[in-house]
Structure formats: structure tokens, C-alpha cells
Image (spheres, grey):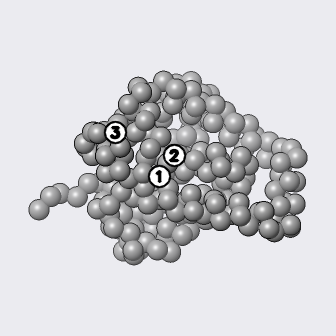
Amino acid sequence: MERMSMEEEVLLRMAQGDESAFSSIYRHYHPSLYIYLLRFCKVPSLAEDLVHDVFLKIWEIRGRINPQLSFSGYLYRIARNHVFKTIAKLATDGQMRAQLYQQLAGIDPEHPDEWVRTKEYERLFEEALSKLTPQRLKVFRLCRQEGKSYDEAAAILGISRNAVKKHMVLGMRFIEDYVYRHGDILMAVWLISTLY
């Protein structure tokens, strides 16, 4: 019998109701899921709310998650569907739209440092992406930004699933290291706390 990967073990524990496993999954996927959702909605506070909604949904359906299938592909499909539903609701709900316009009007005077940190993280994240090798960037975009599973990305790129997985691991490690080296100490602490 093939040995389970660490992520599969964590997903299995989460499916059984282990809150620490869920926290581990949350910390691991939060940064990239936030950036993914921010690309759709363009409002940092809304993107953060959407991230929390997606993880709440993951917790609610944890028993249906198959640890042997691509969790990131599953997570990003749920996120994409949720953001599209939210955007559709914004188009029809006047009160919700008014709240969004208020957020777009300026920086929240209560949390200007959060807005600045978000913008700095986005800038460093984009810089790091631009420095990935072309193949690694293709894999990252397919798996993290388009929600493709490792198997789907492998088929599209004509490489093995293991090669896709390796590109993702090395790509995430590079991004984390890049932000750590080029951001200030607060940015590095913030990134590390969200990734782990």
C-alpha cells in the first residue's frame, strides 16, 4: 500500500474533525487563496471575507473531501464559484453594493496599516511570480490561479503529476523566501504566520 503524503494525512485528520489539522490547512492556503480572490474582487476586505467564507465551507463539507484527490484544485473551484456568486449578488443587492462602494472610497481609517501591508504583499508576490521559471510559473498559474488539479495541470503541460507537485512545492518555497528577503521584518513575520 502506498504511503500517504503529509497533506493527505492532514486532510484525513481534518475530515475526521481535527481542528488543528484544519488550522494547518488554513494557514497553508490562506495567502495564495487571498491573492486569487483579490484578483476577482479588487477589494482587500472583501477578499478576506471571501477567504473566510470558503474555509467555513471547507469545514462544513470536510467529511466529503477525498484526501487522495487534489485538494488545491477542489479549494480553488469552491473559491471561484463563491466569488462569482458574490459578484452576482453584488449586482442585484443595493445595500451590499453600497457597502462595497464605501470600502472602495478609501482606506479604512481604523486599519490603514493592514491596507498598506496587503498592497506590499501583493507587490512582492507579483515580483516573486515574475522571477519563477517559465514552467514553474505555468504550473503555479494553472494550479493556484485557475484551480486546476495536479493531474489536470500535468495533462495540459505534458508532464507528470509528480513534476507538477515538485514545481508547486519549489514555487511556494521560492515565493515565501523572496518575500522574506525583500520585505521588511513585519512583512516577513506576517507572511510566515499566514503560511504556517
Where is residue 67? Give x, y as percent: 32, 64
Q: Nearer the viewer, residue 27 or 100?
A: 100
Q: Is residue 47 left or right of residue 27?
A: right
| Within-10-Å neighbours for mark 2: few <14, some 14–19, many 20+ | many
Which of the two discs, 3 and 1, labels the residue nearer the N terminus?
Answer: 1
- Disc 3 residue crowd, few under 14, some 14–19, many 20+, Cα 10 Å: some
Q: Would you name the residue on which mark 3 appears? A: 157
In what element is the residue under mark 3?
helix
SS category of the residue bearing label 2: helix
* Horizontal side, residue 149 vs residue 126: left or right: left
Residue 169 location, quadrant: top left
Task: Give the percent coordinates (x, y) of residue 55.
Answer: 54, 63
Observer-side mark, 3 or 1, equals 3
Residue, disc 2: 145
CA gap between label 3 and label 1 equals 15 Å
Callouts 3 and 1 close, C-beta under 8 Å: no
Q: Secondary structure at mark 1?
A: loop
Tell me what residue is drawn at x 35 percent, y 43 percent: 156
Q: Residue at x 39, y 58 (%)?
A: 71
Vertical placement of residue 90 versus 154, above or below: below
The residue that disc 1 covers is 147
Left or right placement of residue 103 versus residue 19 in this view: right
Residue 135 lies, in percent from the top left, at 38, 31
